[in-house]
Image (cartoon, rainbow, N blue to C red):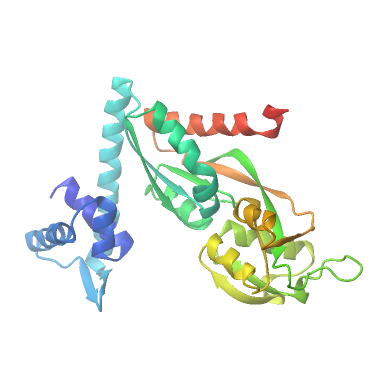
């Protein structure tokens, strides 16, 4: 049994798909399949059940997954220790970021970091806030970036920036403001993100402020990405609450109009596990993201 086999096994378990796992690892599908087959043959057990075109962990596979992750975590810690002793910021940092951050906030900052730290490889996956929190807790990634609240006690949370949420509709669609300028969230259809999304939480908080819940609203569409939500709103599907980053160009071009609601800012936060030893590369990235946020904050520019 090798570490490479364990990496392939855990990737297949997480993706639930052989080809997608192989692509994520930079392998061919046949190489990933051969690694799983070798494990199953060597130990005369079945780790996955083939269901239609997909695969699912068997009972043995579910038990083994916990141990495989623990072994990989220990191997990563040993590698990190050696890198720290060498005093170099090298190796790989795995990052999970929520959609708004990953698409609009993070790329330029990662490019600047890599230019200064060419020995560090950065792997980014996009998840919603709840999934990012889980990934950091379970050790699937080293660093998480979210715009929604988190609660797990194993996490250290650090604010790195702020975001502005806006309520938008298409120019020819009705406004949720009544004739007196009062907000009536039940007057329009809503397009929202999936459960666990920090963007969806913005509407939930607004509804709570108005003494309502999402169950009281007319939810027309639930979509899996900010861009899909924006496109639906531009097509006249209703209203949404979303990051200004996502809709700024559409508002400027007149494809959307902003409805004044006095929505509060929300926090962009960086998450790390409080009990896992960070590598030099991880420390350097965390500090670089924090410094970049300070440099671009309104206070720093005033």
Residue displayed at 73% across by 65% down: 207
206 is higher (above) or lower (below) than 109: below
Q: Residue furthest front?
A: 253
The mark total stands at 0
Question: Dividing the picture into quarters, in which one does residue 32 lie?
Answer: bottom left
275 is higher (above) or lower (below) than 247: above
Question: Dividing the picture into quarters, in which one does residue 38 lie?
Answer: bottom left
Residue displayed at 88% across by 65% down: 181
Q: Which image quadrant: the C terminus?
A: top right
Residue displayed at 78% across by 69% down: 175
Residue displayed at 75% across by 70% down: 212
Q: Is 195 placed left or right of 254 in the picture?
A: left
Q: Residue 190: x percent and y percent?
A: 67, 72
Can residue 235 be seen by looking at this rendering? yes
Question: Dividing the picture into quarters, in which one does residue 236 lie?
Answer: bottom right
Q: Nearer the viewer, residue 236 or 18?
A: 236
120 is higher (above) or lower (below) than 49: above
Can residue 278 be seen by looking at this rendering? no
Q: Nearer the viewer, residue 204 or 119?
A: 119
Q: Residue 194: x percent and y percent?
A: 54, 67
Q: Is 275 placed left or right of 181 in the picture?
A: left
Q: Residue 183: x percent and y percent?
A: 82, 66
Q: Residue 252: x percent and y percent?
A: 68, 54
Q: Is 263 placed left or right of 191 in the picture?
A: right
């Amino acid at each position: 049994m090798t570490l490479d086999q364990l990496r392939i096994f855990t990737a297949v378990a997480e993706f639930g798909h052989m080809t997608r796992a192989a692509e994520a690892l930079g392998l061919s599908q046949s190489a990933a399949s051969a690694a799983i087959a070798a494990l199953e043959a060597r130990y005369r057990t079945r780790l996955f059940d083939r269901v239609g075109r997909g695969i699912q962990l068997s009972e043995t596979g579910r038990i083994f997954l916990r141990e495989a992750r623990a072994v990989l975590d220990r191997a990563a810690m040993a590698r990190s220790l050696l890198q720290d002793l060498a005093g170099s910021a090298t190796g790989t940092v795995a990052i999970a970021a929520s959609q708004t951050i990953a698409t609009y906030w993070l790329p330029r900052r990662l490019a600047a970091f890599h230019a200064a730290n060419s020995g560090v490889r950065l792997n980014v996956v996009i998840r919603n806030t709840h999934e990012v929190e889980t990934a950091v807790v379970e050790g699937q990634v080293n660093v998480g970036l979210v715009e929604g609240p988190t609660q797990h006690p194993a996490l250290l949370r650090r604010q790195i920036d702020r975001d502005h949420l806006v309520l938008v509709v298409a120019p020819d669609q009705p406004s949720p403001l009544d004739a007196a300028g009062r907000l009536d969230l039940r007057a329009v259809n809503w397009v929202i993100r999936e459960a666990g999304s920090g963007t969806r939480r913005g509407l939930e908080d607004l509804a709570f402020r108005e003494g309502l819940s999402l169950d009281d609203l007319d939810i027309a569409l639930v979509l899996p990405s900010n861009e899909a939500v924006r496109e639906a709103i531009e097509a006249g599907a209703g209203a949404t609450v979303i990051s200004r980053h996502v809709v700024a160009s559409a508002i400027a071009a007149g494809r959307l109009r902003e409805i004044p609601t006095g929505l509060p800012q929300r926090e962009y936060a960086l998450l790390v596990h409080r009990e896992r030893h960070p590598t030099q590369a991880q420390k350097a990235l965390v500090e670089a993201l924090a410094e970049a946020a300070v440099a671009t904050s309104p206070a720093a520019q005033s």
